[in-house]
Image (tube, grey):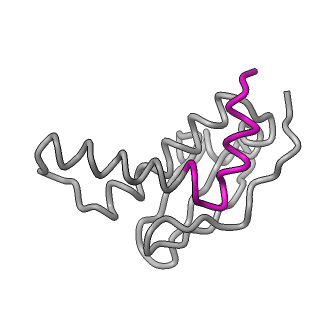
């Protein structure tokens, strides 16, 4: 079920501003073997399977959160960190993503379920 709110052109997460780009599904699956992918270097970009995002709902929310979490992992430099550091960092990151970012309204609409 497609939702009304369109994704913004970018999302700001801490010091990072990542462009959000919808990509044809055949490119995502045939070339990247993924539903999304992130470039964690300037210019930051999140490529997303257009069909999944345009269909909306919980699958789209999952893909969007998954790809954004890669930026959080990079932003907080979480490789080899202790559990409490990882959990605290992701809690802070998810609060920013879900409540303050340009995607907050999109998430609210799409988290209502399928």
Q: Is residue 86 magenta?
A: no
Number of numbered discs on residues: 0
Residue lying at 55% horizontally and 68% vertically, measured from the top left:
12
With 8 as the anchor, is 93 left or right in this view?
left
Question: Of all residues shown, which one is farthest toward the top?
Answer: 114
The percent coordinates of residue 46 (x first, y second) are 57, 59
Question: In the displayed structure, would residue 35 be above or below residue 97?
Answer: above
Q: Is residue 109 magenta?
A: yes
With 73 as the anchor, is 14 left or right in this view?
right
Question: In the displayed structure, would residue 90 be above or below residue 39?
Answer: above
The percent coordinates of residue 98 (x first, y second) are 56, 48
Residue lying at 34% horizontally and 64% vertically, measured from the top left:
75
The percent coordinates of residue 76 (x first, y second) are 28, 61
State the quadrant of the C terminus.
top right
Q: Quadrant of residue 78?
A: bottom left
The percent coordinates of residue 85 (x first, y second) are 18, 49
Q: Which residues are magenta?
A: 98-114
Residue lying at 73% horizontally and 47% vertically, measured from the top left:
106
């Amino acid at each position: 079920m497609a939702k009304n709110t369109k994704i913004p052109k970018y999302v700001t997460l801490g010091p990072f501003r990542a462009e959000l780009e919808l990509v044809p599904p055949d490119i995502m699956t045939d070339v990247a073997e993924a539903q999304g992918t992130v470039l964690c270097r300037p210019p930051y970009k999140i490529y997303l399977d257009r069909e999944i995002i345009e269909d909306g709902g919980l699958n789209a929310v999952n893909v969007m959160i998954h790809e954004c979490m890669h930026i959080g992992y990079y932003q907080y430099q979480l490789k080899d960190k202790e559990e409490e550091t990882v959990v605290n960092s992701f809690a802070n990151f998810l609060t920013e993503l879900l409540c303050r970012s340009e995607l907050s309204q999109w998430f609210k609409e799409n988290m209502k379920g399928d």
